């Protein structure tokens, strides 16, 4: 029972402090502020929250698409045909007969070896 009596003065003191701080505003100011607070809650509930929900739904759809792109790209890298518009010559040294060529799609570097077919014509 003594614990309960010790809490009551704290509760009264806490309420007294809150009332003291809160009473600096006039009744008109409090009414105006409460109306603004209600309008803020309506704005959040009616406009912001549905928009955030839509954004979350779109992000989930986008994640799914990104996963599909990742799977397809991985497959394409594994079976890369090294398209000519994605090839870069890395070593163009005149003294070297072998030129390194890098595929910018799959990031593989290959050595292009010139083959002499015997047709010098």
Image (tube, helix red, strand yellow):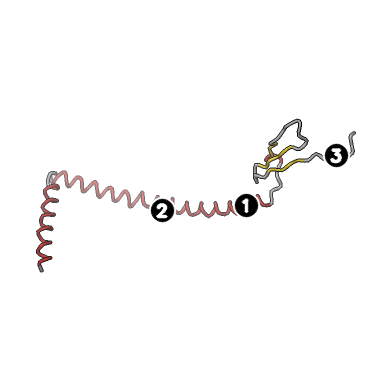
Label 3: how many residues lie within 10 Å, few (<14), some (14-19) or many (20+)? few
The residue nearer to you, when weighing 120 against 29, is: 120
Q: Which residue, given by chain and number where applicable, does mark 1 sit on?
A: 74
**Is 46 drawn above or below residue 88 in the view shown?**
below
The residue nearer to you, when weighing 49 against 114, is: 114
Is residue 104 left or right of 114 when viewed as pictured?
left
Distance from label 1 to label 2 (Cα)?
32 Å
Distance from label 3 to label 1 (Cα)?
36 Å
The residue drawn where x is 76% and y is 38% is 98
The residue drawn where x is 28% and y is 50% is 41
- Numbered tag placed on residue 53 in the rendering: 2
**CB under 8 Å between callouts 1 and 2?**
no
SS of the residue at dot 1? helix
Picture quadrant of residue 28: top left
Name the quarter where the C terminus is drawn: top right
Residue reaching furthest to the front: 95
Label 1: how many residues lie within 10 Å, few (<14), some (14-19) or many (20+)? few
**CB under 8 Å between callouts 3 and 1?**
no
SS of the residue at dot 3? loop
Q: Which residue, given by chain and number where applicable, does mark 3 sit on?
A: 116
Relative image position of residue 27 (x, y in whole percent)? 13, 46
Distance from label 2 to label 3 (Cα)?
65 Å
Relative image position of residue 36 (x, y in whole percent)? 24, 46
Relative image position of residue 50 (x, y in whole percent)? 38, 52
- Numbered tag placed on residue 115 in the rendering: none
């Amino acid at each position: 029972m003594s614990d309960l009596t010790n809490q009551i003065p704290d509760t009264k003191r806490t309420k007294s402090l809150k009332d003291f701080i809160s009473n600096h505003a006039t009744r008109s100011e409090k009414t105006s502020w409460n109306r603004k607070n209600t309008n803020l809650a309506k704005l959040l509930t009616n406009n912001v929250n549905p928009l955030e929900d839509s954004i979350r739904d779109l992000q989930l759809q986008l994640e799914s698409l990104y996963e599909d792109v990742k799977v397809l790209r991985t497959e394409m890298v594994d079976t890369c045909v090294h398209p000519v518009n994605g090839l870069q010559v890395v070593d163009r040294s005149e003294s070297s007969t072998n030129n390194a060529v890098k595929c910018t799609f799959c990031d593989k570097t290959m050595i292009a070896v010139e083959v002499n077919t015997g047709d010098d014509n």
